[in-house]
Image: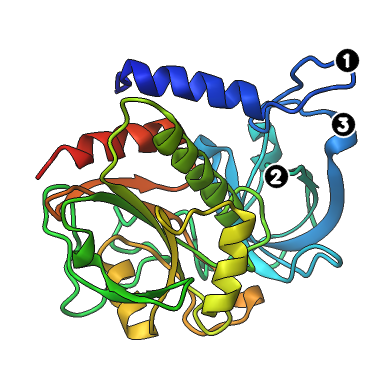
Amino acid sequence: MVRALPLWITAAWIGLLAGCSPKTESGSASSTANSSAPAEGSITNYASRGVVQAVHPEKKSVVIKHEEIPGYMPAMTMPFQVRDTNELKGLTVGGRVEFRLRVTEKDGWIDQLKTVTPPPEPVAATVDPTSTGANPNDTAIRILPNVPALKAGDSMVDYAFTNQLGNRFNLESFRGNAYAFTFIFTRCPFPTFCPRITDHFTQVQKLMTDTAGAPTNWRLVSISIDPEYDTEAVLKGYGNRAHADPARWWLARADYDTLDRITGHFGQYYGRGVSVAAQNHNLRTVVIDAGGRVHEIFMGNEWTPAELVKSLTDAAGKR
């Protein structure tokens, strides 16, 4: 169902898109990052190999445990988008493949998928970071004791964090404000994962602060799932690069026990205390209303900044 956006959000979003569109030498707007055919000169290509973990034709996606991509990304397990579902034909879980990774500043996908002959016997997937938690057998979902799944309308549990300024805070301190929190790690390299979520938060911050008529009782929180590396200083630098205003947007860290519990409420998967190469994770963004209740849960990375602005706006009015 398509949700209608308030006029102030629609107008602000159109203005933001116009302001952020890259320009060609002639001065006209070029293709956006979501275009199916970005400028060829903006694409960097990498050859890679790996083992198929899951195939999702309906999402134009395949999860691959890939080898190190020298000069770009360590060995990881992650979903990759394809532009043509024909690329996925004949792929089997456990099969070895070769492929071309194509990366722009804001997007990434693969093509030229080819099964390596002879493939090994199919094996069960080790992890599927695209899992939503709907299936209890999803390999990306950990069930922790005494950590209930939270849904819209449930009261948010209070947890303590430290922000990029070194200040301790509790989620309960946001009472009276709507806030959205998401999970990232600063070393995440692929543009459609943490970098896209962070870029969306940057746009949400701009829309909410620069537009007349927007509510003022709102906050953003990016929670690191890599607290051993993501110190306050690292988070501060990352936030500065994202133009995070500390008056509105905190980058936060906590101990693993806290992370296990808050992620467990929403089906957020992550690797605890692992290297970048082993950090396989999915994506969740959660909106809490001004009364401290779960307002909305965004799965994955396909939501837009305008949708999050709409959700935050609605949540800000619920006491």
Amino acid carrying mark 3 in the image: Glu
Mark 1 and mark 3 lie on one chain; the one further toward the N terminus is 1
Q: Nearer the viewer, residue 58 or 157?
A: 157
Q: Which mark is residue 71?
A: none
* Circle nearer the viewer, 2 or 1: 1
- Name the residue located 45 percent from the left edge and 55 percent from the top edge: 283
Amino acid carrying mark 2 in the image: Gly
- Name the residue located 86 percent from the left edge and 47 percent from the top edge: 45
Q: Which mark is residue 26?
A: 1
Q: Is residue 176 visible?
A: yes
Look at the image and tell me in which quarter the C terminus lies.
top left
> Helix or strand or loop: what does disc 1 sit on?
loop
171 left or right, relative to 226: left
Q: CA distance from mark 3 to mark 2?
A: 13 Å
Above-or-below relation of 223 to 228: above
Q: CA distance from mark 1 to mark 3?
A: 17 Å
Q: CA distance from mark 2 to mark 1?
A: 26 Å
Mark 2 and mark 1 lie on one chain; the one further toward the N terminus is 1
Look at the image and tell me in which quarter the N terminus lies.
top left
Mark 3 closeness class: few <14, some 14–19, many ≥20 residues within 10 Å: few
Above-or-below relation of 11 to 251: above
Residue 201 in the image: state x and y as whole percent. Answer: 48, 47
280 left or right, relative to 291: right
Residue 170 in the image: state x and y as whole percent. Answer: 25, 72
Q: Which mark is residue 40?
A: 3
Q: Which mark is residue 108?
A: 2
